Amino acid sequence: MTVLEALLRPRSIAIVGASRRPNKVGNIILRNLLASGYRGKIYPVNPAAPEILGFKAYPSLRKVPGEVDMVVVAIPAEHVLQVVDEAAEKNAKVLVVISSGFSEVGRRDLEEKLVRRAREKGMRVLGPNIFGVVYTPWGLNATFGPSMILRGRIALITQSGALGVALMGWTSSIGVGLSAVVSVGNMADLGFDEISEVLAEDPETRVITLYIEGIKPGTGKRFIEKMRRVSLRKPVVAFKSGRTSRGSAAASSHTGSLAGSDSVYQAAFEQSGVLRAMTLEEMFDWARAFAEQPLPRGNRIVIITNGGGVGVIATDAAEEQGLRLIDPPEDLVREFRRHMPWFGSAKNPVDLTGMAAGPEYSGAVEAALKHPDVDGVIVLYCETGLVHPRDLAGALIETYRKVRDEGVEKPMLVSMIGGDETNKALIHLDRRGIPAYPMPERAVSAMAAMIRYKNWLDKALHS
Ligand code: COA
């Protein structure tokens, strides 16, 4: 096992600072490990308790039998250095240092000592000042965040701990699954680039998302080189905060990082193929598309709708974002016409009219997906009494599966606008691999991000 493999797939974990008290960080981490179904060995370490939550506890790391791959450290900062030597004796590969009180409050000396000592002994450090690490395929939730996280294919690396914790809950509430959540905090040792490299090799992760406030001074060139290699393997979507000078000052007092000039980050993202989202929502909108759908081969898109208004909105967004709404060729027009009343429109956006129900949508979507002149399809729906949102979602899922089983590999994104039943249908679609959004521009923006990534990939692979 390599050092970094231990970050996602540790065979054994010691929690130094596992507390007997239920409201303490070290206690919550232990509970989360149990709740997430972690199957490796768990060793709580506590100088005073013989047992915690039914586990035999050890007074020090030294007393733990056998080797320990990962040591989670949840004791006050001033005691953390003592743990390093003991962890090395246990052949630990990675220290997950939850404790705050390092460079973010001016204790750079303590942080540097921690990393120097760990590296000398062949260990790597995640943190300090973090909420921990999650890797759902391994049943690993070594955090003091929520215990229930939906398994999926999106990895999140976050510089802000609290935000990461909140996003774990939020993604699960909207039906979005995660493969990994890694809190990097002060990034004293491991940062975005190296963890992205690990995730690039991870078969369970299809897209990597980054919440960035700033990278460490002097690591920019390395970031670009490594992230470029990662982007060649899988898409990376970043949301960078601290864009304004006041925001940047707030970032530096948060994690001690230098947010720096925004244009420098913009250039770094462009050079490395990292897609920059301008909001958190956008980052996850795009990530959901990458996680579940094949990349489009080109930018020739068809929009299919039951409402003229949303069709127009999506068309504007598509034009602004460089999608090409093709004029459907004769054979496709004929096909579309079979699935709409005489007053519908077979132009692009294809308006099936408010009369459309499941069969009309299915027919038109199948025809569009199968046509060689079409690279991707965006389906829009305004809630009507003619078709229940759940039934339409079912029809779309079935149609997409059928076409895919026939060998067609094209992306389809959906937007449904309506009330509670529509919102349920969105989650239903998402959980079955079809990214679905409550507003049409969001579906368009996700399709545009896929096309941009495909273009970057084609260029980078042939340069
Ligand atoms: N080895 C093992 N266990 C030790 C220990 C040591 N050297 N020193 C103390 N402990 C035990 C304590 O006895 C206690 O267990 P108990 O409650 O059963 O007595 C437990 O470890 C925790 O120690 P305690 O001193 O109570 O610390 P704490 O839980 O109040 O705080 C931190 C520890 C790490 C949570 C706190 O210092 C901290 O840094 N909090 C911020 C964390 C954070 O926000 N991170 C960033 C997130 S984004």
Image (cartoon, helix red, strand yellow):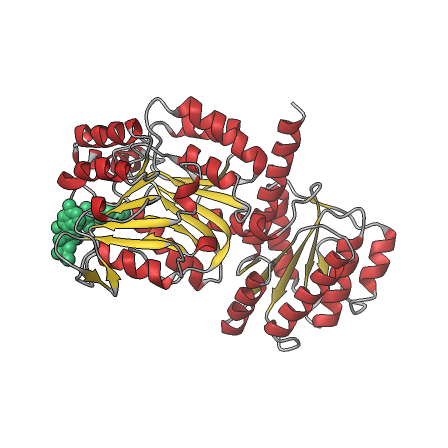
Q: Is residue 129 above or below residue 431?
A: above
- Quarter of the image with the C terminus is top right
Q: Is residue 114 above or below residue 435?
A: above
Q: Identify the image quadrant of residue 147.
A: bottom left
Q: Nearer the viewer, residue 8 or 360?
A: 8
Residue 59 in sight:
yes
- Percent across and percent down for residue 307 are 65, 64
Q: Identify the image quadrant of residue 249.
A: top left
Q: Is residue 443 rendered to the left or right of residue 157?
A: right
Q: Residue at x 81, y 68 (%)?
A: 342
- Percent across and percent down for residue 31 are 29, 61
Q: Nearer the viewer, residue 206 or 294?
A: 206
- Quarter of the image with the N terminus is top left
The residue most toward the front is 65
Q: Nearer the viewer, residue 52 or 160?
A: 52
Q: Residue at x 72, y 64 (%)?
A: 399
Q: Nearer the viewer, residue 19 or 62?
A: 62
Q: Residue at x 48, y 28 (%)?
A: 226
- Percent across and percent down for residue 373 are 79, 46
Q: Is residue 257 above or below residue 285?
A: above
Residue 146 in sight:
no
Q: Is residue 378 rendered to the left or right of residue 256?
A: right
Q: Is residue 76 rendered to the left or right of residue 184?
A: left
- Percent across and percent down for residue 29 are 28, 56
The residue most toward the bottom is 385
